[in-house]
Amino acid sequence: MSADRYLFTSESVSMGHPDKVADQISDAVLDFCLAADPTSRVACETLVTTDLAVVAGEITTKAALTREAVDKLVRDVIREIGYVAKDQAEREEIGFTADACQVDCRVHAQSPHISQGVDIGGAGDQGLMFGFACDETPTLMPLPIDLAHRLVDNHAKMRKNGDLRWLRPDAKSQVTVEYNADGTPARIHTVVLSTQHTREVMTTANGQDYFTDDARQLIIDKLIRPTLEADRKDLIKGKLVLIQPGKPLPKLADGDIACHINPTGCFLCGGPHGDCGLTGRKIIVDTYGGRGRHGGGAFSGKDPTKVDRSAAYICRYIAKNIVKAKLARQCEVQLSYAIGYPDPLNIWVNTNNTTAPGVTEAKLVALIREHFKLTPKGIIETLDLRRPIYRETARHGHFGRELPTFSWEKTDKADALKKAAGV
């Protein structure tokens, strides 16, 4: 790598990762409440571990959120993710299945002291939120997180359609991209993919269990290579080289992509049985993979009066429209709020010196004030957020996915911003 280039890495996790299981359960509860009562106030947290799911939080809703309803929601999510077993032996090996896990519901009403500020249109909490967009990909997402998300998305598809029948739901991906000095991607440098699996692709050596190298190569050939080629074939500059755990590193030619597949050696025990999962622990995966800043607030399980979620969505919407309008090649937006107070305390923009000629960051702030409603009420109305749309956000990223329900991914303000900027 030349001295004027640098590396940047982002990771994603699959829908079966323990923390994502928890996120999806929390958002399934939110969707259930919003479907029956769009004004529901929900702050739902979930913990999952071996044969146990605990659902807790502050929820005020007219929906029939009984213990029986929560029990069914939890089991439906777990079943849809793929934690099911055909017999008792497989159930014990997986350690967390839809039919066998215990569900503990610990939900109560929202504090009236929070409600009194939110009821008059104020923010549901204090805090700071960020949004980001850049022109590295068609979705205006940073390339490393975009590729990492595509890998776990395709992992889930191949697992479900049987293309790689020995995959199980828990998986993590990681992509390192080499950048030119001007911030443009030069090539894909390294890919890491760890996936839970069945015994079908295990071998034993010296008394230790190992994932087979044949299975590793299949993941490269059937999952990693097609995903990279579909997204950025132009950034594949060499061979995809399998790095075998515990063996000397092979000599890589310039441009080769190092592929680490299950680098610990084996991944039979996974999911909530292998690691406890909690709502809100994958906030960097949920956003931009470490590009740009993060305000620290998680998204899943929170209704849109919670600006941790809704303001982060409007920040993405603003940043994406600014980049789409070609007012900047990259854009980061910050808003901050005080609990119970409707208007943001500040609007901040950073473009990393990529603005178009004649455009300044101060001018972008003025355009934001003019073209976007930034009170909680205005955000909810602009993005139509009182809908049961959130369970899908809890897997494979909240941003960069062109789904009809992801209203914050629209670029319908780009033309107006460009015209108002006079460029």
Image (spheres, rainbow, N blue to C red):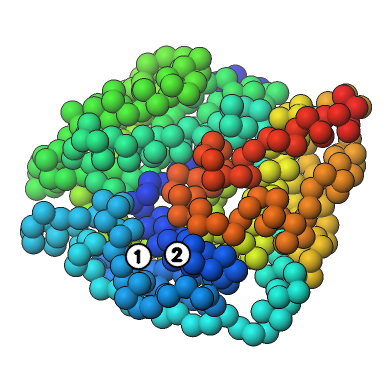
Callout 1 crowding tier (Cα within 10 Å): few <14, some 14–19, many ≥20: some
- Indicate whether 199 appears above or below 357: below
- Which secondary structure lies at badge 1? helix
The answer for how far apart the CA atoms under marks 1 and 2 are is 8 Å
Q: Residue at (64%, 23%) from the top-left corner? A: 184
Residue 32 tag number? 2
Whether label 1 touches label 2, CB < 8 Å = yes
Q: Residue at (78%, 52%) from the top-left corner? A: 373
Q: Residue at (51%, 76%) from the top-left corner? A: 62
Name the image quarter holding residue 72: bottom left
Residue 368 percent coordinates (x, y): 83, 45
Image quadrant containing the N terminus = top right
- Indicate whether 386 appears above or below 265: below
Residue 210 percent coordinates (x, y): 17, 42
Is residue 386 left or right of 221 when viewed as pictured? right
Residue 73 tag number? 1
Q: Nearer the viewer, residue 232 or 184?
A: 232
Q: Residue at (28%, 25%) from the top-left corner? A: 222
Task: Determine if residue 377 is in view.
Answer: yes
Residue 307 tag number? none
Q: Nearer the viewer, residue 90 or 392?
A: 392
- Which secondary structure lies at badge 2? helix
Callout 2 crowding tier (Cα within 10 Å): few <14, some 14–19, many ≥20: many
Amino acid type assigned to the residue bearing label 2 in the image? Phe
In the rendered structure, which disc, 1 or 2, sits on the residue that comes first in sequence? 2
Is residue 325 left or right of 36 when viewed as pictured? right
Residue 19 percent coordinates (x, y): 41, 58
Amino acid type assigned to the residue bearing label 1 in the image? Leu
Image quadrant containing the C terminus = top right
